[in-house]
Image (spheres, rainbow, N blue to C red):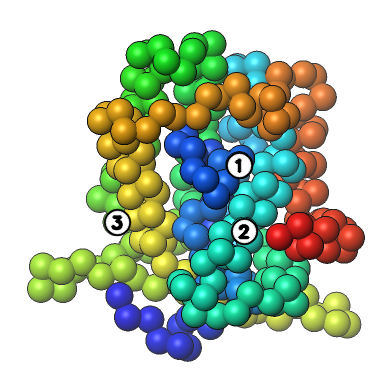
């Protein structure tokens, strides 16, 4: 896919966060961004953090008697992205790692709001299926054959869902107050080409006037990365080349907790808190890298 410099500058580069199931040396806590858009990070250019459908998650939390601390979830995910960017910036992005540009990227990215309902639903499905899997295998030992079998089933469900999303070749976005369907790719002479989709983003200007900025994103990149990740994880599990994480890890770290009566209000607030990090919190996050 060829993207011009003009298109690149206007790329909103949506990023979703998910729980990985296979250990790596780089990430102590496996909450990872997908795609790994470190090119935008190290250049200080804006990305959009995909939100979740909190109404659906509230219902699931109550059903499973589990709860995710989203503040920790997002902050760990952002930290992992920064650490990956620091390690790979010269090799992948061909750009130096400057903390002033990280500040610019993070300040702009945590505040932006876009209505991309299908991406929200897709990432909510991914998180929901993980939590259902967690609720089952958290009671098992990692060496139990049922543990690996359930993780393979989880990978299959995610693969089926996102393959179906690509086969439908349709994604819903909101533009000028109305929802509309866009194609994810187009076909030319039997070849598939990802589409670059334009969306309007409202930004606040001094004096109380809203300005609308046109930006773009490529949904195919997100779906393709998710599928590649889960095909790879399934291969490792099936061929028993690597042992998965013990899911008790997330409980010990205080990321997945037991559901209580106060968690419904906390769910919305914890996600919003990430978008309203105080300057000192932003600085601490940057300085930890």
Q: Reading the chain from its start, which is encountered first: label 3 or label 2?
A: 2
Figure quadrant of the C terminus: bottom right
**Which of the labelled discs sits on residue 169, or is there none?**
3
Q: Secondary structure at mark 1?
A: loop
Q: Which residue is disc 1 drawn over?
A: 28
Residue 116 can be seen, yes or no: no
Q: Secondary structure at mark 2?
A: helix
Location of residue 172 by image quarter = bottom left
Query: In this picture, is 75 found above or below 36?
Result: above
Q: Position of residue 53 (x, y in %)?
A: 60, 41
Q: Is residue 249 left or right of residue 196?
A: right
Mark closer to the observer (3, 2): 2
- In space, the residues marked 3 and 1 are separated at their CA atoms by 36 Å
- In space, the residues marked 3 and 2 are separated at their CA atoms by 34 Å
Q: Which residue is disc 2 drawn over?
A: 83
Query: In this picture, is 265 found above or below 138?
Result: below
Figure quadrant of the N terminus: bottom left
**Which of the labelled discs sits on residue 123, or is there none?**
none
For image coordinates 15% across by 69% down, the residue present is 191
């Amino acid at each position: 896919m060829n993207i011009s410099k003009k298109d690149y500058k206007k790329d909103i580069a949506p990023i979703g966060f998910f729980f990985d199931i296979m250990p790596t040396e780089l990430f102590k806590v496996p909450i990872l961004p997908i795609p790994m858009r470190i090119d935008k990070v190290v250049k200080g250019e804006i990305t959009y953090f995909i939100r979740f459908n909190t109404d659906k998650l509230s219902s699931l939390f109550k059903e499973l008697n589990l709860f995710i601390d989203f503040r920790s979830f997002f902050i760990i995910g952002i930290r992992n992205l920064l650490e990956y960017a620091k390690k790979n910036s010269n090799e992948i992005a061909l750009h130096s790692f400057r903390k002033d540009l990280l500040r610019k990227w993070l300040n702009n990215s945590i505040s932006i709001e876009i209505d991309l309902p299908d991406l929200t639903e897709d990432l909510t499905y991914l998180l929901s299926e993980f939590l259902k899997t967690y609720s089952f295998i958290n009671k098992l030992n990692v060496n139990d054959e049922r543990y690996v079998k359930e993780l393979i089933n989880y990978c299959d469900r995610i693969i089926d869902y996102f393959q179906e999303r690509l086969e439908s070749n349709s994604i819903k976005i909101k533009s000028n107050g109305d929802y509309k369907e866009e194609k994810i790719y187009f076909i030319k002479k039997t070849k598939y080409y990802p589409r670059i989709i334009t969306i309007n983003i409202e930004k606040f200007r001094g004096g109380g006037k809203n300005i609308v900025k046109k930006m773009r994103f490529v949904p195919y990149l997100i779906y393709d990365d998710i599928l590649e990740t889960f095909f790879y994880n399934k291969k490792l599990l099936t061929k028993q080349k690597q042992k998965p994480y013990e899911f008790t890890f997330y409980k010990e770290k205080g990321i997945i907790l037991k559901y209580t009566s106060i968690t419904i209000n906390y769910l919305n607030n914890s996600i919003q808190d990430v978008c309203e990090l105080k300057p000192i919190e932003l600085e601490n996050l940057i300085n930890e890298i």
